[in-house]
C-alpha cells in the first residue's frame, strides 16, 4: 500500500489522533492542520486534552490511534529526528536558578547539539536580541517573572527550531510582559518559525492566525478568529437593564440560552443556533416584569469558546 504524500504547506497534520489512558479517552479523534509560519492558538478548559495532544505531537507520548505528521516526519516513528527541529516552552520556569543568563543559554545550546564553534556566537546573538546585555552574569533565580519568561523563550529557540510548542507560557507574568512576549512570537513567525501556543487568555487567542478549541478531548472549533466569530452572527445580544442581576436570574438556564454574563450594568447573552434569540429574551424579561433594552452585539472569542464548550452533551472529563 502506498504512503500518502506529505503536505509541505503544513507544519502539523493529524488524522484521527486519539489517546486513551485505560477507560479514559483523553484525546478523541482529533484532525488538525497547522500551516507553516503561523502562530496557532490552542484553547480549551482545564482537562480538555491540550497538553496531552502537545506531548503526542512532540513524540513524547505514543498515540493510541491515528496519524501524526510534524514537519514532514511521521510521529512517533521519526520522533528522535523531530526533536532536533522543535522547541518546547512550558508555563513553569524550567531553567536553572543557580546558573547565570549566559550559563543557562550555553548549557541549553550544548544540550540541543548546537555546534561548539557556533555556541558563543548564538548565545551572544540571543543576549542582544532579548535585552540581557546588562544581566549576562545575573543568576536566573534572582530575575523577575517577565525576565525569566524572556530567558526561557531564548533557551527554547537557542537551536533555531522550525516549530515551537508553548504550553501556557504567559500564565505567571504581568500584562506588559505578555504583550512584549507576543511581539517576540510574531518576530519568530516572520522569520519562518511555526508556533503552537496553548493559552487560556482570550486577548492572546485574538492575536493568533488560527485557533483550535478542544473540549473533553474533542476538537470542537477550528479556524481563524474572524471565521469563528462570524459563525456566531445573530447569536449574541447586549441587554441593558436597571436591575441587571434580576435580569440575569430571569434568563439564566432558560432553553436556547447558553450563557448570561454581567459586564458592568449590562448583560451579554449568548444563544443557541437557530432560534429568534432577541424575541425570546424580550419575552422572558417582560414575563419577569423587568424593563430592558435588547440589542445585537458583535460576537467575540469568549462567545466562541463558550459556544464550543457548552453546546456539547456532558461526557466523562479528559485528562
Image: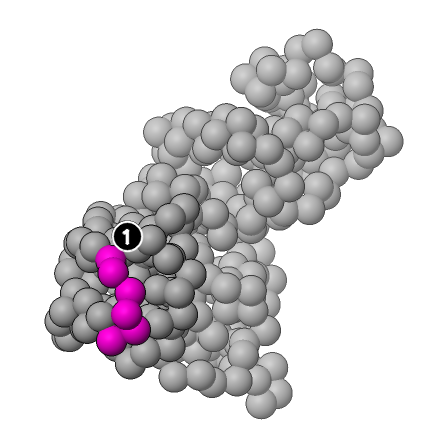
Q: Residue furthest top?
A: 134
Q: Which residues are magenta?
A: 287-292
Q: Residue furthest right?
A: 98
Q: Main secondary structure of the magenta part?
A: loop
Seen at 21% across and 51% down, the residue is 297
- Which image quadrant is residue 113 in? top right
Q: Along the horizontal axis of the image, is 132 left or right of 103? A: left
- Quadrant into which the C terminus falls: bottom right
- Disc 1, SS: strand
Q: Verify whether residue 290 appears in magenta.
A: yes
Is residue 300 visible in the rendered image? The answer is yes
Out of 103 and 249, give the one closest to the viewer: 249
The image position of residue 9, as x and y in percent, is 26, 49
Q: Please state the horizontal and vertical placement of residue 87, each as a whole percent of the image.
A: 55, 43
**Which image quarter is the N terminus in?**
bottom left
Residue to which mark 1 is pinned = 240
Q: Is residue 307 above or below residue 256?
A: above
For image coordinates 24% across by 76% down, the residue present is: 287
In the displayed structure, 36 sits above or below 232; it is above
Within the image, what quadrant is residue 42 found in? bottom left
Q: Position of residue 165 (x, y in %)?
A: 51, 48
Amino acid at each position: 500500500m502506498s504512503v500518502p504524500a506529505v503536505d509541505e504547506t503544513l507544519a502539523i497534520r493529524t488524522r484521527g489522533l486519539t489517546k486513551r489512558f485505560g477507560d479514559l479517552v483523553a484525546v478523541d479523534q482529533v484532525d488538525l492542520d497547522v500551516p507553516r509560519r503561523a502562530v496557532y492558538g490552542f484553547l480549551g478548559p482545564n482537562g480538555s486534552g491540550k497538553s496531552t495532544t502537545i506531548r503526542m505531537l512532540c513524540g513524547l507520548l505514543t498515540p493510541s490511534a491515528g496519524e501524526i505528521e510534524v514537519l514532514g516526519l511521521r510521529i512517533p516513528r521519526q520522533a528522535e529526528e523531530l526533536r532536533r527541529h522543535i522547541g518546547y516552552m512550558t508555563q513553569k520556569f524550567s531553567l536553572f536558578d543557580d546558573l547565570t543568563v549566559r550559563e543557562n543559554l550555553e548549557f541549553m545550546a550544548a544540550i540541543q547539539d548546537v555546534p561548539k564553534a557556533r555556541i558563543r556566537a548564538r548565545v551572544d546573538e540571543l543576549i542582544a536580541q532579548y535585552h540581557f546585555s546588562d544581566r549576562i552574569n545575573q543568576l536566573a533565580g534572582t530575575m523577575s517573572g517577565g525576565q525569566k519568561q524572556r530567558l526561557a523563550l531564548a533557551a527554547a529557540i537557542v537551536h533555531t527550531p522550525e516549530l515551537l510548542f508553548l504550553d501556557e507560557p504567559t500564565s505567571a507574568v504581568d500584562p506588559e510582559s505578555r504583550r512584549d512576549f507576543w511581539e517576540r512570537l510574531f518576530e519568530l513567525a516572520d522569520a519562518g518559525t511555526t508556533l503552537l501556543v496553548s493559552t487560556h487568555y482570550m486577548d492572546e487567542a485574538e492575536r493568533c492566525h488560527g485557533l483550535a478549541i478542544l473540549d473533553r478531548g474533542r476538537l470542537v472549533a477550528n479556524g481563524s478568529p474572524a471565521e469563528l466569530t462570524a459563525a456566531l452572527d445573530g447569536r449574541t445580544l447586549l441587554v441593558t437593564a436597571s436591575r441587571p442581576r434580576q435580569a440575569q436570574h430571569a434568563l439564566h438556564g432558560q432553553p436556547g440560552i447558553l450563557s448570561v454574563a454581567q459586564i458592568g450594568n449590562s448583560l451579554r447573552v449568548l444563544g443557541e443556533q437557530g432560534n429568534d434569540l432577541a424575541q425570546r429574551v424580550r419575552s422572558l424579561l417582560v414575563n419577569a416584569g423587568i424593563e430592558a433594552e435588547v440589542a445585537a452585539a458583535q460576537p467575540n472569542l469568549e462567545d466562541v469558546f463558550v459556544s464550543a464548550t457548552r453546546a456539547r452533551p456532558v461526557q466523562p472529563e479528559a485528562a
